[in-house]
Amino acid sequence: MEADQIKQDDQNILVLTDFGSCARHAADHAILLGEALNANIVLFNSYFMPNSAYDNQSSESHNVLIGKSKANLEKEANRMRMLIESHQAKYKPMVTAFHNEGTLGDNAQSIAHEKTLLMVIMGGQSNNCLLAEEITHLIDRVKLPIVIVPEPD
């Protein structure tokens, strides 16, 4: 699904995912918040192709990366939809999923300019320097509450 399928006046929670266990844990929390706040879920995966990949690999490799992102994103969106249906909440959030190349911060900023977002939710892993850099960039770009859900016990 594409981002423009989300109505501008809907309230949304942006859930950033890398498809790992921390991201799934964060998505589960986003569902509970969406039910409580009457907000829909925008599930997003940002993938990044290093410049060297364009030099050393064919466009087929790029297409494989995009295909994997899309397949994993749809799998996670379907998992979330099934979880929502199993809940007895009055409000059942709609889950929309999409992906794009680039940094989390730049992509989240673009989404925030186009959609009504209440907050951003993502999973956090301890001792992850790359994550710290991404979070700093995200904070600089997106002027919304950012919830970082820690690793499950």
Image: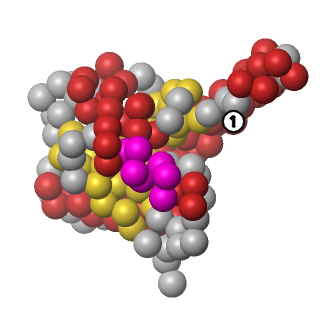
User: Residue 121, how many percent across, how many down?
Assistant: 34, 54
User: Residue 69, how many percent across, how many down?
Assistant: 62, 36
Colouring convention used in this rendered image of the protein: secondary structure
User: 114 and 103: which one is in front?
Assistant: 103
Which residues lie in the magenta part? 132-138
User: Residue 111, how many percent across, how many down?
Assistant: 32, 30
- Say if the magenta span includes residue 23: no
Q: Is residue 100 left or right of residue 141?
A: right
Residue that protrudes farthest toward the top in the picture:
59
Quadrant in the rendering for residue 6: top left
Q: Mark 1: which secondary structure? A: helix
- Residue at image position (47%, 65%) is 124
Residue that protrudes farthest toward the bottom in the picture:
153
Q: Is residue 26 left or right of residue 72?
A: left
**Is residue 110 visible to the viewer in this orientation of the structure?**
yes
User: Residue 14, how many percent across, how many down?
Assistant: 32, 44
> Looking at the image, how many numbered discs can be counted on the residues?
1
Q: Main secondary structure of the magenta part?
A: helix
- Residue at image position (36%, 36%) is 108
Quadrant in the rendering for residue 96: top left
- Residue at image position (40%, 51%) is 136
Q: Height in image: 35 above or below 44?
A: below
**Is residue 24 visible to the viewer in this orientation of the structure?**
no
Q: Height in image: 75 above or below 97?
A: below
Quadrant in the rendering for residue 129: bottom right
What's the amino acid at mark 1?
Lys
Q: For label 1, count other residues whose C-alpha is less than 10 Å away and answer few (under 14), some (14-19) or many (20+).
A: few
Q: Is residue 112 left or right of residue 51?
A: left
Q: Which residue is mark 1?
A: 68
